[in-house]
Amino acid sequence: MRENFQAMATLAAAKMRPVFPATPLLRNELLSERFEADVYLKREDLSPVRSYKLRGAFNAMRKVIPDQSLFVCASAGNHAQGVAFMCKHFGVTGVIFMPVTTPEQKILKTRMFGGESVEIRLVGDYFDASLAAAQKFSAEEGAHFLSPFDDEDVIEGQASVAVEIEQELGRVPDHIILPVGGGGLSAGTYSYFGNECGYTFVEPAGAKSLAAAIAEGAPVDVSPVNTFVDGASVAKIGARTFERLKTINADDVIALEEDRICATIVEMLNVEGIVLEPAGALAIEALGEVAERIKGKTVVCIASGGNFDFERLPEVKERAQRYAELKKYFILRLPQRPGALRDFLDTLGPHDNITRFEYMKKSARNFGSVLIGIETDQAGNFPAMFERIDAAGFTYTDITNDETLAQFVI
């Protein structure tokens, strides 16, 4: 069974070569030194559409062409771009359904890859509405619906990543770290390598669909999900993908906080010059969770995508600083008397900088509420600062990690 899957995945990878080259497998010196291992990055961010998604689209489409010439999908991101690219390559028609709320940048990129071969339809405020419209249209028109992950041909196409890893490395790595969303990439890789290597499957903390499925023994809906890691924020893992993943060890599945992933995005950009989307950074950030396990071993992290909207960079930097405890927000109850503000400013240290100061309202006749953001150069500076604020008699509420309040006031 596995040998047959390996053969089909290897054939799929070979069929792709006239369309696009294998993505590079590069040893990363920074990460190798930090974790005392040979750490390689499989750079799917360097594919023609800056993600691995075109692999599954290519494999699923090549198997039904020329009998089928109309393809439909629902996506607001990488899957749409992969399908669009392949529709143009094969010279077939694609109808791509996207939510009305899809950022214009993603719409333009999808249109750029597909050209005249693709029609984009904006339907619904959320993905579920777009998906329902796409499936209805596909059934009515007799089109081929291209699932982003829950399709055997798509899984087989994504397994070409594993084929290339083995070819480029010359052997099976000791350990592979994979991001998990709907499960197409992880199911394909696990089905190809089997038990020949160790695994770490990484999900965003706000969308732990694989962990939930393993606990229940079947895919379950974990809605609502945190959509920050949009390339991996899936409410329910695919039935076909889970069928291939159901035997994995539950201890090999981990979840990472969204703010923590931001720290890796910033470091990879500033230090390595690598642009990663949040899902693309999952595997790299997970190295810290398995540091002892991978010492002295050959490890491959799959950087699954680099479709990063730079308009999000301020938010990513902000979240990274909050995770590293270099930035905090709090609401200060400021007495309405002369000199109160100066007294507060005296509690700040030489490395504490005010990045936001917003008078919100008077909470009482003699007090007002002020939203304050403080940035420092070392996390250890904050405890001492708060001690000085307490000693000065000020009342405040730390809202740094209050997600509900942060959405409205930060």
Image (cartoon, rainbow, N blue to C red):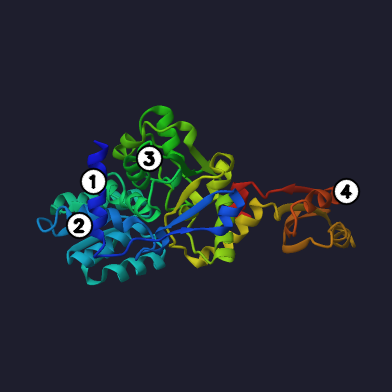
Which residue lies at the image location 46% right of the left edge and 32% below the top edge? 250
The image's mark for residue 236 is: 3
Give the secondary structure at mark 3.
loop
Q: Is residue 289 above or below residue 72?
A: above
Residue 410 seen in the current view? no
Number of numbered markers: 4
Q: In which quadrant will I find the C terminus?
A: bottom right
Q: Which residue is mark 1?
A: 7
Q: Is residue 166 above or below residue 114?
A: above
Q: Which residue is mark 2?
A: 71
Label 4 vs label 2: CA separation? 66 Å
- Please rate how many residues cluster around mark 2, counting C-alpha atoms within 10 Å: few if below 14, some from 14 to 19, many from 20: many
Three-letter amino acid code at disc 3?
Lys
Q: Nearer the viewer, mark 1 or mark 3?
A: 1
Which of the marked residues, 1 or 3, is nearer the chain's N terminus?
A: 1
Give the secondary structure at mark 4.
loop
Residue 109: image x %, image y %?
36, 68
Pointers 4 and 3 in contact (C-beta within 8 Å): no
Pointers 4 and 2 in contact (C-beta within 8 Å): no
Three-letter amino acid code at disc 4?
Gly
Which of the marked residues, 4 or 1, is nearer the chain's N terminus?
A: 1
Residue 105 figure quarter = bottom left
Label 2 vs label 3: CA separation? 24 Å
**Residue 342 placement, left or right of 128:** right
The image's mark for residue 393 is: 4
